[in-house]
Image (spheres, helix red, strand yellow):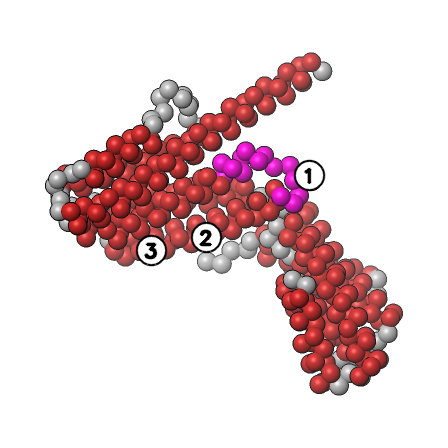
Amino acid sequence: MVTLGPRVLKTGISVTLALYITEWLSLEPPMFAAIAATFTIQPSIYRSWRQVLEQVQANAIGALIALVSIYLFGHNPFIIGLVMVIVILVCLKLNMAGTISLTLVTVVVMMSQPAYTGLLAAADKFLIVLVGMGSAFFVNILVSPPNYKKNFFTLEQEALRGISLLLRTAISDELTEKSFQQQWRKVKQDLARLEDLYKLLDEERENISKIKPLDVREIVVIKQRLECLQLGLKLLDKIEEHFFQSGPTSEEREMFDQYIEKLTMQHEMALLKFEGKIKYDLDSDPDLIQESSLFLEKVVHTNQTEKGQRVRLIVIASALYEYAFQLQRLNDLTELFLRKKKIAEQTREKRRWRK
């Protein structure tokens, strides 16, 4: 089912706004502003701002090249095509590949209308572009501004449910092949989207933190949460590749199944702890690194399987160790973040009472 996302809605609003403004200012042709607005809508405020800056520069260069070419060589189809090639090369040289499409539209419109040339014409075209880009930029800020942290947490819960289901049934082999493959594909898609959301969050932290403050400690926790999800999926890959091929005994099946269940539960508890839904106590938290080391040693020294088959189990146990190591780090980072957050809240409360 196709859903009407915020970006789709904002594209329509920005195009409408751009057309109304160009009509009010009597700028021609107004559709050029609509095209500019369409290209400027981006998935984040920072990317929209960067797109505006790059489009202004690229369109200025494109308009200048088009004007010079008209005065020197005319505006026949061969010249227009040659100018298009030159503009593309210039944009690529300046690392403005994302501005090429709109810049080419500017060049075509200017060079295909010989009666509409000159500095005034170039200024008019430039103003139309600015109207379109400005409309898209302000709509992106004012209408349903993106909340990538909230989107990340929502999608993360869904991805973790999928990975937990797959890990908990990987050893027991309870899911049908069709259900398993469908869930696996969905988890991979969710992780790809989570990686994109994290990149957007990190971009905002680096570039607009003065305008929109972001807690760096929270970004670190989010990055670690993504790392744990990725390792959970890698662990699943190792199980599928090596476990059943190793010819495990019933005791080994039970041993791996129980330990995977424990790590999966710890992963879920770490997220619940971050949300403040469960109590946390440093003394009661298990030492996952020590436990995973003991588990790995047990697998290495087991005499129940042949040496070649035991190597496959060691590969899986090593992946379990890495998963446990990163889960322990996630747990530590989460507790540190919560303690710092609590101290900051107490400090703000004291200041409020003093006032």
Label 3 is placed on what type of residue?
Gln
Query: Would you identify the image quadrant in which residue 148 lies?
Result: top right
Q: Residue 144 carries which label?
A: none
Location of mark 2 (residue):
192
Q: Position of residue 332 (x, y in %)?
A: 44, 29
Q: For label 3, count other residues whose C-alpha is less than 10 Å away and answer few (under 14), some (14-19) or many (20+).
A: few
Name which of mark 1 and mark 2 comes first in the sequence. Answer: 2
Name which of mark 2 and mark 3 comes first in the sequence. Answer: 3
Q: Which residue is drawn at 53% across and 35% down?
A: 218
Query: Would you identify the image quadrant in which residue 92 lies?
Result: bottom right
Label 1 is placed on what type of residue?
Lys
The secondary structure type at the circle numbered 1 is loop
Task: Inspect the magenta stretch and tell me whether residue 20 lies in it.
Answer: no
The secondary structure type at the circle numbered 3 is helix
Magenta-highlighted residues: 206-222
Location of mark 1 (residue):
210
